[in-house]
Image: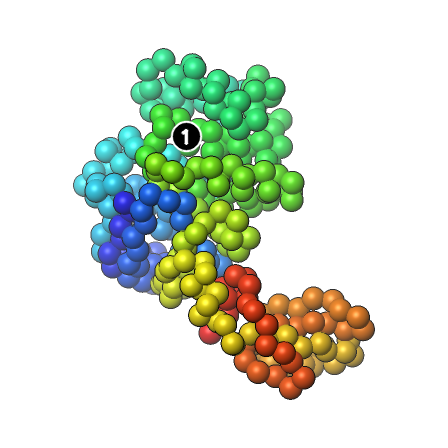
Amino acid sequence: MIQAKGLAKSYGSVRALKGVDLEIGTEVFGLLGPNGAGKTTFMRILATLLPPSSGSATVAGHDVLEDRIAIRKILGYLPQEFGAYPKLSGREYLQYIAALKELRRPEAEIERLLSQFGLSQVARRRATAYSGGMLRRLGIAQAHLGSPKVLLVDEPTGGLDPEERVRFRELLMGLGGDRMVLLSTHLVEDVEMTCARLAVLKEGQIPYEGTTRGLIDRFRGRVYEVEVPEEEVKNRLAAWGDRVLTSRRADGGRAVRLLGEVDGGKEITPSLEDAYLGLIRS
């Protein structure tokens, strides 16, 4: 289990985390929030790369301050800004990480991971020649080395094209079972496709923790859609302000989703994106 109690982190006068309480079990769990909400800070604390300012956090019963070596032995981590050494091939990079993890005879596992993540055909190619999707797959492959009990995956689909994003989400869906997987992202669809439970991080605090269905249910009866003529869109959106969730093009104007009743609007079943945006903007 990953457990945080009153976890806080400050950078000078900036409070990145403000007393986070969170428990994560053996599952693929989503940490969803906008850029700057504190997600990467939270992940780096769990990965023992950053000390908290106050509060506590444990990973599989090990304290992030007192048991860093024990945590690193059971941890796989894909950081947001992952980059392999440019002069190494994909296979050589995994061999290097295996040596750092002090794995004995890792050759068979490396070949299995290269195959599992679709990298066998490019294993001898230097990492600088990899596409963004290949590089992210190499990142998750290195995180898997040694069959860690805990996986921390930070913004894994950022910068990927739609096809690679779908492929990577499919990989994530198969990562649960007997391990803890924490997926940090600002993309609602990443969580919607891969996680049954999530927490929303907003300005260093968690206003919601629970199931994706529970977050949607919180906003039932509160989301409305109205069609707005194109010539009125600018003024209407400005008047509604933060009530606006999304808008899309419709015949002769826009279909706008917003919080609360509106003249000419109809109540609709909220999507996970509607509920998330409603929580962030309320």
User: Residue at point 60% right, 42% down?
Assistant: 166
4 with respect to 187 (left or right): left
Residue 206: x %, y % from top left: 36, 62
For residue 86, which quarter of the picture? top right
For the residue marked with disc 1, what is the amino acid?
His
Between 131 and 195, which is closer to the camera in this rendering? 195
User: Residue at point 53% right, 32% down?
Assistant: 137
Residue 97: x %, y % from top left: 40, 24
91 relative to 237, above or below: above
68 relative to 9, above or below: above
28 relative to 73, above or below: below
Q: In which quarter of the image is the N terminus?
A: top left
227 with respect to 32 (left or right): right
Between 58 and 276, which is closer to the camera in this rendering? 276
- Residue at the left extreme, as displayed: 66
Could one spot residue 141 in this view of the protein?
Answer: yes
User: Residue at point 58% right, 38% down?
Assistant: 167
- Residue at the bottom extreme, as displayed: 263
- Residue at the right extreme, as displayed: 252
Q: Dot 1 corresponds to which residue?
A: 144
